[in-house]
Image: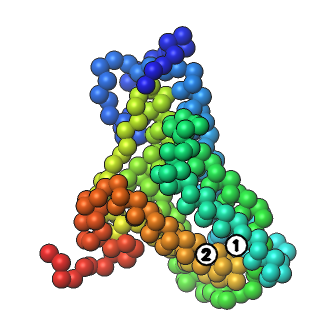
Amino acid sequence: MKTNTAHAATIKGCPIHQLLQIPRNDAGAARVDAAGIGIFAFGVAAYALFFGVFVYAALFVGNWFVPKSIDSGTPAPLGEALLVNVGILSLFVLQHTVMARRWFKNWFTGFVSQAVERSVYVVAASLILALLFWQWRPLPQVIWDIRAPALWWALTGLSVFGYLLTLSSSFMVSHADLFGLRQVFFRLLGRQYQPVGFRLTGLYKLVRHPLMVGFLIAFWSTPAMTVGHLLFASLTTAYIFFGTWIEERDLIAHHGEAYLAYRRTVPGFVPLPRFGEA
């Protein structure tokens, strides 16, 4: 990748190569231009937005410490709540489904740098979630409300564990690549992007979708289940199963027999043994 030598600078001994899984196979120092710096700044800002939304999402669903949560505010009529809540969640599903497809990426990178494609995806998803939290219409009718201290803490702790499982699972493959940091750092260094590739590591040896298992645990483990929370958990669960089905079709198309063999031997969500297999 060419750089603008008029604005070039060098990076020596950068300590985050290993964290971002960027091979250090250059004979010389990296070359950085003004465009690369701008792209990198955008990628970092996109990541910061994602992380803030991710933390707020956990607090929103758990009804923890935030002024606007899944059950707070004036209850809305059922029709209005369904229209707004399902509508925004459907927008999130549409954005995730379309922008993650290879045909869309090929089209989109005809207009923007390939280095920022993932960061734009992250920004779009984060803004839709922020809109959801802002406009969510509560349906606070109680389905269950567990107040026994031991069970309350157990379910709350299990929900927190789910979010930690999701976050840790993202690092087992490449957290930086998943959220666009690795791509913009390659561009900052003036180097051609190298995909992480298919790797079998950590919890991915037990289930194919540990990141999504974390979300399922987090959303359903609640000591107080309301109609609104049930709506949110049900719709996100439906999308998780639909989304992973679509994703696996892409993975099979890209990795072929390597992923098919992985799918035959490793369960999708529940780490149960596959009996009768060698």
Q: Are marks 2 and 1 in contact (CB under 8 Å)?
A: yes
Q: Residue at x 55, y 71 (%)?
A: 239
Residue on which disc 1 sits: 86
Disc 2 element: helix
Label located before the other in sequence (2 or 1): 1
Query: Could you say where residue 72 lies in the image, as x and y percent from the top left?
Result: 78, 72
Residue type for callout 2: Leu
Residue type for callout 1: Val
Name the quadrant of the C terminus.
Answer: bottom left
Residue 243 seen by the camera: yes
Could you classify mark 2 by the number of other residues whose Cα lies within 10 Å: few (under 14), some (14-19), or many (20 or more)? some
Q: Residue at x 60, y 45 (%)?
A: 120
How many numbered marks are there? 2
Query: Could you say where residue 32 lies in the image, as x and y percent from the top left?
Result: 49, 21
The picture quadrant where one finds residue 31 is top left
Camera-side residue of 124 and 230 = 124
The picture quadrant where one finds residue 37 is top right
Query: Could you say where residue 194 lies in the image, as x and y percent from the top left?
Result: 37, 38
Q: Is residue 11 above or below residue 228?
A: above
Residue on which disc 2 sits: 235
Locate residue 111 relative to residue 60 in the image: left or right: left
Camera-side residue of 144 and 190 = 190
Camera-side residue of 146 and 164 = 164
Residue 11 seen by the camera: no
Outermost residue, left side: 278
Outermost residue, bottom side: 143
Camera-side residue of 43 and 220 = 43
Disc 1 element: helix
Could you classify mark 1 by the number of other residues whose Cα lies within 10 Å: few (under 14), some (14-19), or many (20 or more)? some
Name the quadrant of the N terminus.
Answer: top left
Q: CA distance from mark 2 to mark 1?
A: 8 Å
